[in-house]
Amino acid sequence: MGRWEPDARGRLAKAALELYGERGYEQTTVAEIAKRAGLTERTFFRHYADKREVLFAGSGELEDLFVRAVTGAPESAPPLDALSLGLYAAAELFTDRRDFARARHAVITANAELQERELIKLASLTSSLAATLRRRGAPETTASLAAEAGVAVFKVAFERWIAPGEERLMAELTRESLDELKAVASGGQAVPVEPAD
Amino acid sequence: MGRWEPDARGRLAKAALELYGERGYEQTTVAEIAKRAGLTERTFFRHYADKREVLFAGSGELEDLFVRAVTGAPESAPPLDALSLGLYAAAELFTDRRDFARARHAVITANAELQERELIKLASLTSSLAATLRRRGAPETTASLAAEAGVAVFKVAFERWIAPGEERLMAELTRESLDELKAVASGGQAVPVEPAD
């Protein structure tokens, strides 16, 4: 098996995803991941705290990028416009690695504990965004609703991005999801969208 | 300690909430709950599978009521209008027992495992509502976004309903949250709302 990327971190992540897919997440050990990557367990633990972190290592970066863009939005921008800037900033994280994201999603869907972790990650993102909007002066409930809506747009766009056969960019799918949210909330039926495959 | 309600189920729930508040959820046993309620452990297990279920016993009813109302909405109703009917149907569950809901919320907030369970409950509600909207003919992503938005409205209204000093009805807070969602999604800053206390 050739090297996927020259970096140890990327090789470990690729090896982990392969093994989780082949044997199941529960059945895979750190020793096996390190071996598959041609590295030592010691190297694994320099990069990841445990085998679960391989799947969630990017969530801090996602939240930082998202929150930073909302914080930096023009003061006059209403909540959903500020969130849109965050959504487009976050979309830049989803450029390559679509196959990795698909494999990761399949592993998470198959494991209740990992699904919970994913829900917690999104709840944390929602709380951070709501706090950011409140700091920008949005009333309490407006901030909460806008943050929930923004994360919903992210979730739906991401689910479409990893759908089988989907090739459009995350930014484009984000824009479509935002438009659909607006259509839904304005009381209309959103225009049906072409299926992804 | 007098009886709160004549029914065993209600007495067990009240005793459990008292003990979770006094000693912490982790430290409370089923035996202690039964004793506080003046009942046997056997009676406890006729009503609840375990001590966690005391806190989540109502979630099936909430989901059923919500989904049934959305299913029964007029065929021509756009997704958010159908969801609104579900929200108002669900609001009828939150008439009395506001103090119970406040005590329950405090227990859940103090315990990571219970918070996860609450997130899973809401994710399950969101999935059911999205499936219901799809059955009504909504496109896949419209259904997902509308369901996420509807559950966000529910969460925000519920958080306001249990806020200290809040006395308004869940239906009224639901209506306000729906209006705020529409204002947020239409790109405007929602009109600031009076604080709850």
Image (cartoon, coloured by chain):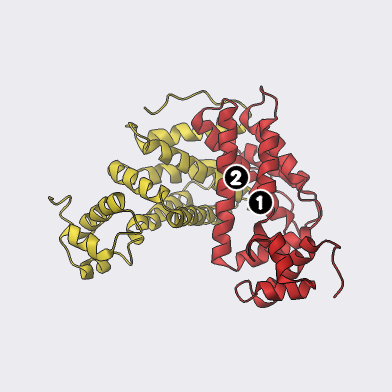
Chain colours: A red, B yellow
Comparing B80 with B9, the one in front is B9
Task: Give the SS element for disc 2.
Answer: helix
What's the chain of the residue with tag 1?
A
Q: CA distance from mark 1 to mark 2?
A: 9 Å
Q: Which residue is mark 2?
A: A125
Comparing B48 with B35, the one in front is B35
Residues at discs 1 and 2 in contact (Cβ within 8 Å):
yes
The image quadrant that residue B39 belongs to is bottom left
Name the amino acid type tagged 2. Answer: Leu
The image quadrant that residue A85 belongs to is top right
Q: Residue at x 75, y 66 (%)?
A: A12
Residue A84 in view (yes/no): no
Name the amino acid type tagged 1. Answer: Ser
Residue A22 in view (yes/no): yes
Q: Which mark is residue A59?
A: 1
Q: Is residue A134 above or below residue B37?
A: above
Q: Position of residue A21 (x, y in %)?
A: 69, 72
Q: Residue at x 71, y 54 (%)?
A: A160
Crowding near pointer 2: few (<14 within 10 Å), some, many (20+)?
many
Comparing B32 with B126, the one in front is B32
Q: Position of residue A166 (x, y in %)?
A: 78, 57
Residue A101 relative to residue B169: left or right:
right
